[in-house]
Image: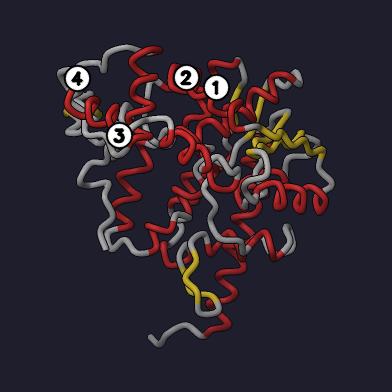
Amino acid sequence: MGLKSNICIRKDEDLLFHELKKRFAEAVERNRAEGILFSGGLDSALVAAYSGKSKAISVGLESYGEDRYYAERVAKFLKLDHYHKTVKIEEAISVIPAVIKILKSFDPAIPNDVTACRGLKCAKDMGIGSMMTGDGSDEIFAGYDFMLKRTDLEEYMARMHPVMRFSSNKIGEALGIDIKQPFLDKEFMDFSRGIDLALKIRKENGQTWGKWILRNAFEGVLPQEILWQTKRPLEYGSGMTELRKVIESRVSDEEFEKGKKKYPIKFWNKEHFYYYRIYRDVVGEIPAPKKEEKICECCGAGMDQSAFHCRVCGGVTEWGKPKN
């Protein structure tokens, strides 16, 4: 048999686009909530597009980050009830101990978690009891830049999906907010994981894109500027990455050198050490591994046998490291 014609291929893709949109709308309906943790990125914008009258809450660090621009652009297009919370640097830093205590972790991804925490706290202050997030989209539809180059991506994703965890769940639980995640809805996830990887990563106008199928399937649902924006990690879009510079400046060279000698931990940098000092104050000692767990080579904590990284220190296993 010969190859399918371009017309047949396009027809098959159009049918898949239609089915994807239908199933996503159903997933949002099953996971409807009063509010949305909203950045204006592709994932939260898609959730917002099908969310009805849910309140959209975005967070930004003073004058840093791009999320406010995109959030306001999407909010205007979709006529959302949008609230933006501006956070000052000292306020953001003051939240770090609470985040570390909730997550029981000194993973350097803390600035990302501070953003989620401030957004969910804002929701709580507004009397909102349930929030939707865009969690899971990047993991399922290959949205991270490192995925575009990974040669073992299908195997990597197959191993990653069963062990995925998101900080918003723990933070929401601590604040008394029910977290809903449409992309992680079981029915939708089962369907989406079956989509060919060639439809998740594809070249368009000379550039390789992750989440290609999402960008194409939802044409007309969102503006082109939103559909084809590049990936902005939450900490960058919100501006919280600026915290890293401030935190680094609060640890002297002498303190860092003493800390590296005192504690049997592989610290990435001064920022990592800063979080660990807080961890010791608000959590305590690193828990010993359980019988069935493997040991983190960076901090000695226990890890699930299938884990990609340590939930306590953020250390990455060999399997979790990019393979190009």
Residue 46 image position (x, y, % from top left): 66, 49
Mark 2 in CB contact with mark 1 (< 8 angstroms): yes
Mark 4 in CB contact with mark 1 (< 8 angstroms): no
Q: Quadrant of residue 181?
A: top right
Name the residue type under label 3.
Asp
- Residue at position x 38%, y 42% from top? 161
Mark 2 in CB contact with mark 4 (< 8 angstroms): no
* 38 up-or-down from 78: above or below: above
Q: Nearer the viewer, residue 230 or 141?
A: 230
How many numbered badges does the structure rendering display?
A: 4
Label 3 secondary element: helix
* 246 up-or-down from 175: above or below: below
User: Does residue 27 appear in the picture of this structure?
Assistant: yes
The residue where tag 1 is placed is 94
Q: Which mark is residue 289?
A: 4
User: Depth-wise, is mark 2 or mark 3 nearer the camera?
Assistant: 3
The residue where tag 3 is placed is 253
* 251 up-or-down from 147: above or below: above
Name the residue type under label 2.
Pro
Q: Neighbour class for label 2 at 10 Å: few (<14), some, many (≥20)? A: many
User: Split into 4 quadrants, where in the image is the C terminus?
Assistant: bottom left
Q: Neighbour class for label 1 at 10 Å: few (<14), some, many (≥20)? A: few
Q: Nearer the viewer, residue 37 or 26?
A: 37
What whole-number distance in Å separates the C-alpha atoms at marks 4 and 3?
Answer: 31 Å
User: Is tag 2's residue or tag 3's residue first in the polypeptide sequence?
Assistant: 2
Q: Quadrant of residue 17?
A: bottom right
What whole-number distance in Å separates the C-alpha atoms at marks 4 and 1?
Answer: 30 Å
What whole-number distance in Å separates the C-alpha atoms at marks 2 and 3?
Answer: 22 Å
Name the residue type under label 4.
Pro
